[in-house]
């Protein structure tokens, strides 16, 4: 499960994380938007703590 993290993240000295979301929480647009909002709430401060922004790698 961590193959991509090792190959693309760790091997290139990039910050990385694996996030698993239950499929039933993504069953409809409401669920997708709810999970996206939760992830943004958690990831934005983490990125800021690393000195990164959402557009650094865009």
Image (spheres, helix red, strand yellow):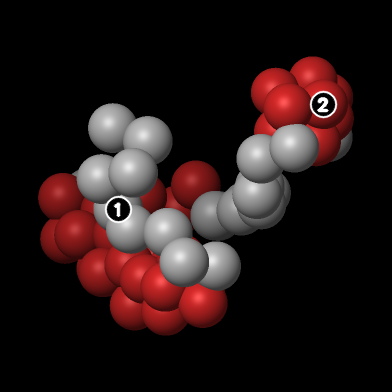
Q: Position of residue 14 (x, y in %)?
A: 66, 40
Q: Position of residue 16 (x, y in %)?
A: 66, 47
Is label 1 in a helix, a strand or a loop? loop
Q: Quadrant of the C terminus?
A: top left
Determine the image quadrant of residue 8: top right
Q: Which residue is mark 1?
A: 54
Q: Position of residue 29 (x, y in %)?
A: 16, 50
Name the disc covering residue 45, or none: none
Taking 42 as reference, is 35 left or right? left
The answer to which of marks 1 and 2 sits earlier in the sequence is 2
The residue shown at (79%, 20%) is 7
Question: How many neighbours does mark 1 have within 10 angstroms: few (below 14), some (14-19), or many (20 or more)?
Answer: few
* Up/down of 10 relative to 56, above or below: above
- Can residue 35 be seen here? The reply is no
Question: How many neighbours does mark 2 have within 10 angstroms: few (below 14), some (14-19), or many (20 or more)?
Answer: few
Mark 1 to mark 2: distance in Å? 21 Å
* Up/down of 32 relative to 5, above or below: below
Name the disc covering residue 11, or none: 2
């Amino acid at each position: 499960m961590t193959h991509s993290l090792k190959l693309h993240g760790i091997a290139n000295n990039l910050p990385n994380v694996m996030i698993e979301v239950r499929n039933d929480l993504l069953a409809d647009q409401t669920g997708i938007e709810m999970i996206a909002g939760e992830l943004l709430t958690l990831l934005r401060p983490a990125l800021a703590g690393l000195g990164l922004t959402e557009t650094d790698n865009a």
